[in-house]
Image: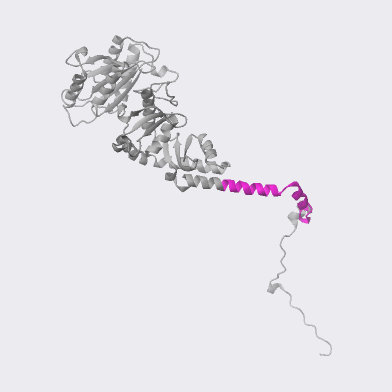
Amino acid sequence: MVAIIKTSNSVQRILNYNEIKGKEGKAECISAINFPLELDRLNFTLKLNRFRKQASLNENVKRNAVHISLNFDPSENHSKEKLNEIAKVYMDKIGFGKQPYLIYQHYDAGHPHLHVITNNIQRDGKRIDLHLLGIRKSEPARKEIEEVFRLVKAEDRKTREQFSLQLIATQKIEYGKAESKKAINGVLNKVLFEYKYSSLPELNAVLNQYNVHADRGTEDSRVFKNNGLLYKIIDKNSKPVGVPIKASDFYSKPTLKFLEEKFKINEIKKQSQKSHVKNAVRMAFFNKKIISPEKLADCLANQGINMVLRKSKDGQLYGITYVDHKTQCVFNGSSLGKDFSAKGILERCKQSISYNGKHQNISSSLSPENTQNLASNEYLKTKPIELLMRTENYNDYVPKHLKQKKKRKLRRGI
């Protein structure tokens, strides 16, 4: 069993997510603990008001909603009674046994799992400490429950799967092969919270690799004017397919306002990682004959860096974005410096072509005919030992103080 604990400042958002899943037939509320009415008599409003009333006992606590996911091995097929019992024991052991909570069984993933909704405000108004709750209480509770209920142990799995509240996509989305909203949501959960991007184009540089695109619409569109954001699936030619989905319809609410906050935080976080991409580009030009941006992109791909080339309709390169999957940082070329922008890369490619051309000219000048002509030269006929021993520079200059004075000859008769 794998337990995941998440907190939020909106219990309504969490409740709404699970209730919508229930209406779609992908989830079912199987238990309501510490509620004044029976489960079959509770509607959405009554459930929400119970949590709100509990939260009102301490209005100083902002993140008072707790969302827990209990995930089981795909080979396990437990009854609702057993799942309810497991959830109750788990909540007791982590200190939430007296809190109001709802248990939902979900059917929208490849493994059995439960979602539990609760809050951390107690009857006396004191809050339950959530700091390191996973390490201090959840992990010991999980291990004990695995033994008592004879569940598949997380540590015994050959490849431990990383579970989340939704199934995370690891491959490109193909329209029609999976539910669009679920597929996009899986990609968003992976990219939005793992990669460091500081603009919408930088975010799209990553999303496009999974065939997802975030779009604000045209400037005169209603979506753009209302600061809205749409997520859509694209094909291999980057053309949208299917119906776009509003950002507010997703569980994580990846709206434009949410992204703008991430832009500010990520801009600071990724500054220290610039050197990794810059050094990779420099070494590529140093070690290999890079004659085009496409050749450079192929070279960087081997190092885990995707170089996204932005071209106009006529095929002219006007922008470059680097997606470094090793550091999970995204950089616009111009933010790394002039040498790494589209213009700078094109100039360096031209220099490489020019250098290679000169080298070829020198090599071609040493053709067999030219080599024979050079061999007839006296200089080339000289033996190597003579070339080494002979003096190259001659100088007849002798210092004045070393010159011997000439004796004056006296003429006879003078």
| Quarter residue 323 falls in | top left
Read off the magenta span.
Answer: 351-380
Q: Can I make out residue 99 in this image? A: no
Tell me if residue 405 comes above or below residue 289 in the rendering. Answer: below
Q: Is 324 covered by the magenta stretch?
A: no
Q: Can I make out residue 296 in this image? A: yes
The x and y percentages for residue 397 are: 70, 70
Q: Residue at point 26% right, 18% down? A: 91
The x and y percentages for residue 145 are: 32, 15
- Quarter in which the N terminus is drawn: top left
Q: How many tags in the picture?
A: 0
- 333 left or right of 91 in image: right
The x and y percentages for residue 107 are: 34, 16
- Quarter in which the C terminus is drawn: bottom right
The x and y percentages for residue 147 are: 35, 13
| Quarter residue 180 falls in | top left
Q: Nearer the viewer, residue 238 or 306?
A: 238
